[in-house]
Amino acid sequence: MDDLYYSDYIELDKILNCQRPRSFDKMEDGNDEMLFIIIHQAYELWFKQILFELDLVRNIFIQERINENTPDMSNVVHKLKRIVKILELLNQQVSVLETMTALDFLEFRNYLLPASGFQSKQFRLIEAKLGLKMEERHKKEYYKSTRRGSLSENDMQEVTRVESESTLKQLIVKWLERMPFFEEQYWVEYKTADESNGNKFWTEYRRVYSAGLSAGEGGRLVEFDAVFFKDGRGDLSPKAMQAALFITLYRDLPIFQLPFELLNTLSEIDELLSNWRYRHFSMVRRMIGVRAGTGGTSGAGYLEGTLSQHYAFREITEVATFLIERSKLPSLPNVLKEKVSFNV
Ligand code: HEM
């Protein structure tokens, strides 16, 4: 039997023979179109790996209950941190393409019309699996149509189908809502200054939070009440917001260490994607100024709009709005402390 050969194993011939710079047939001297194609291909390969990790994480979260005695939770955090590392790489990669100047790009730009990164199905799938919805996007009319320069019918259908599956965000919300620590049994012995109504912990926490607000921040308490007791925030119910805040506050307790890392990593993914959007937008301005994109959007103007709008985990990151200093954290009742420590 023949030994497996490196290039066969990774199908190198296929990869190295699928760059077809359209302008090379006509131009005598090479230009930067080869670089342009290879960079896009490298991005798409990494997008594929991100999608693979995301599916794995979603499959773990789709279970009715995540058993803390299995490696599930640490696997989830591990895979999400891998996505963070890939995104860091994808951010750095922009500077390789930026060695191409605007004039260099013009040498071949017309050859790729009306193709555009806007048609990257894998990029849309990443956004969709994380939890960004089509109707929440900046300039959603661009996505709804399958006009020239947009997603093809087939790709649009696939993105729409994936959007209807459970997104990572929805699964995280359900997981947060399942957190059991506000059940009455844990709080019986808990003493607060005001025992008048509702959960004792939240009554106490609200008091400390309110005392820490400066004179100009009066409206925050109204917001606090709405977020944690009435409407929730964005896609997170009050229960999910309470759990996210509680995990963030008591992250040093053994049972919350991984959940905290998980929430923190989701914010990091959002931040890195947003950094990429910014780097891509800046590069686009340098390459084409304010001309329309090959994909038919307004170009840099459109991309700038996506920067502030396309966050999947905005609510989780914004939990920071409602923190108090560590030294003022209410200490937890013993029965709960025992429950959340590994050594009892
Ligand atoms: C010379 C370099 C580049 C230029 C001038 C450029 C230009 C643009 C423009 C103008 C858009 C808006 C859609 C349109 O009307 O075409 C866009 C979208 C996009 N581009 Fe690029 N791009 C460049 C490189 C890249 C690279 C290397 C990637 C990597 C995959 C990429 C991925 C994307 C994605 C994913 C979108 C959609 C972004 C969104 O809708 O949020 N682009 N690009």
Image (cartoon, rainbow, N blue to C red):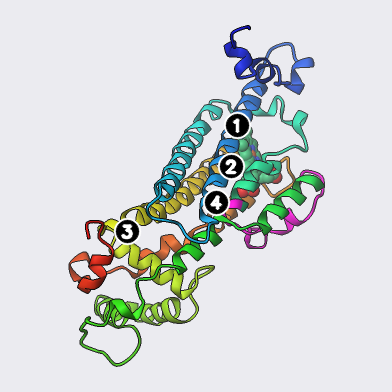
Q: Which residue is mark 1?
A: 45
Tell me the CA gap for discs 3 and 1.
34 Å
Q: Does the CB distance between marks 4 and 2 fall below 8 Å?
A: no
Q: Which residues are magenta?
A: 129-150
Which mark is nearer the camera, 3 or 1?
3
| Residue bearing mark 2 | 51
Q: Is residue 50 above or below residue 315?
A: above
Of the pair 285 and 219, the residue shown nearer to us: 219
Q: Nearer the viewer, residue 332 or 186?
A: 186
SS of the residue under disc 1: helix
Q: Residue at x 33, y 83 (%)?
A: 199
From the top left corner, tell me how far across and down residue 342 is, in percent. Answer: 26, 56
In this figure, which residue is indicated by the disc labeled 3? Answer: 256
Between 282 and 264, the one lying in front of the other is 264
Give left or right: position of 2 versus 246. right
Residue 141 position within the rendered picture, expressed as x and y whole percent measured from the top left: 73, 58
Q: CA distance from mark 1 to mark 2?
A: 10 Å
